[in-house]
Image (cartoon, helix red, strand yellow):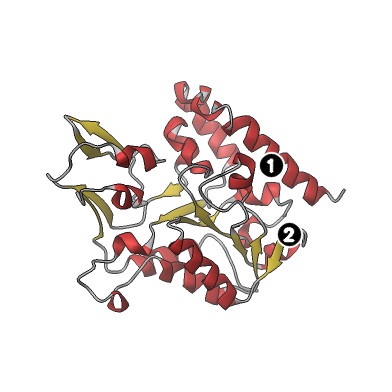
Amino acid sequence: MDKRLLYKKIGKLVYKMTYKPRLYRYDPLKKFPKLAQKVSEKIIPKSDELVCLPNDKVVIDQEIDSEEMVLPTQIIEHFIDESSYRVIMNDCICRSSNGCKDFSQGFGCIFMGEAARGIHPNLCREATKEEAKEHIRKAQEKGMIYLAGKASFDTLWLDLDDHKRLFTICSCCPCCCISIATPYLSPYLTKWFVKLPGAEVTVSDDCVGCGNCLDVCVFGGIEMRNNKATILDTCMACGRCVSACKSGAIELNINDDSYVSNVIERLSNRVNIGK
């Protein structure tokens, strides 16, 4: 068996062993911050960064023409346009490992850049720029959010050598994404998950304390206080709580007119997706 296919099987096995029994909730390093810092410096390159991008639907104000707005997907579309090579994975390693029932297990991530050429052809299909954009549009319709940027972890299970030339676009569901472990891990191991610049989630007095928002928040960014949802510093502004709130009490606003160009510059300095 080609070792690239073997590594995929090992990756799925590790996910099942860690996530099925919820072992990620018991991080021993959380009690030893200095050790956690050393471990993170060893296994997570400083250049790694995944930016959490909310679904466009939670950003658009229904009273404003969306064509006039700058939306999170424009960041992804920029990198698709700049990419020299693109593939769409045949399945999502997280959803297929977890046996996801709410979202399609066959709806995979997008990998871009010259390093993506080394992904085994049995695991993916080459995509044109328009096919990649259509894939993102479908993720929007399914209500997914995105984690986009540089993740050296992906080069391990894909058996790729050049982590500086692989750009990751994950379409994430709230039940299976590896990010559901972030509230339980040492901050040193999760600092490469980054909130969108200028994004802010607020809760109005219309909150009825139903708790729907807690069910969909995977980053541990919200809790109930005095029967009202309260946004914490750990909020990643993914916007899932906005969609889940039946009373319309939660809003996501982006108070940075240049957030798209800022994110593009930050990620461009971390990963090269051209030739």
Query: Could you tell me residue 133's position as x and y percent?
Result: 52, 72
Residue closest to the eye, 62 or 130 = 62
Residue at far right of view:
1
Query: Could you tell me residue 220's position as x and y percent?
Result: 37, 37
Image: 243 above or below 13 = below
Q: Residues within 10 Å of mark 1 (few under 14, many from 20)?
A: some
Q: Earlier in the sequence, mark 1 or mark 2?
A: 1
Amino acid carrying label 1: it is: Gly
Q: Is 23 situated left or right of 215 in this image? A: right
Mark 1 secondary-structure assignment:
helix
Amino acid carrying label 2: it is: Ile
Query: Could you tell me residue 56's position as x and y percent?
Result: 36, 64
Give the residue at x 34% y 40%.
234
Quadrant of the rendered image containing residue 84 = bottom right
Quadrant of the rendered image containing residue 99 = top right
Task: Specify the quadrant that holds the C terminus.
Answer: bottom right
Give the residue at x 67% y 51%.
155
Quadrant of the rendered image containing residue 38 = top right
Q: Is 202 situated left or right of 72 in this image? A: left
Residue closest to the eye, 163 or 240 = 240
Which labelled disc corresponds to residue 11?
1
Residue carrying label 2: 119
Q: Is 269 situated left or right of 95 in this image? A: left
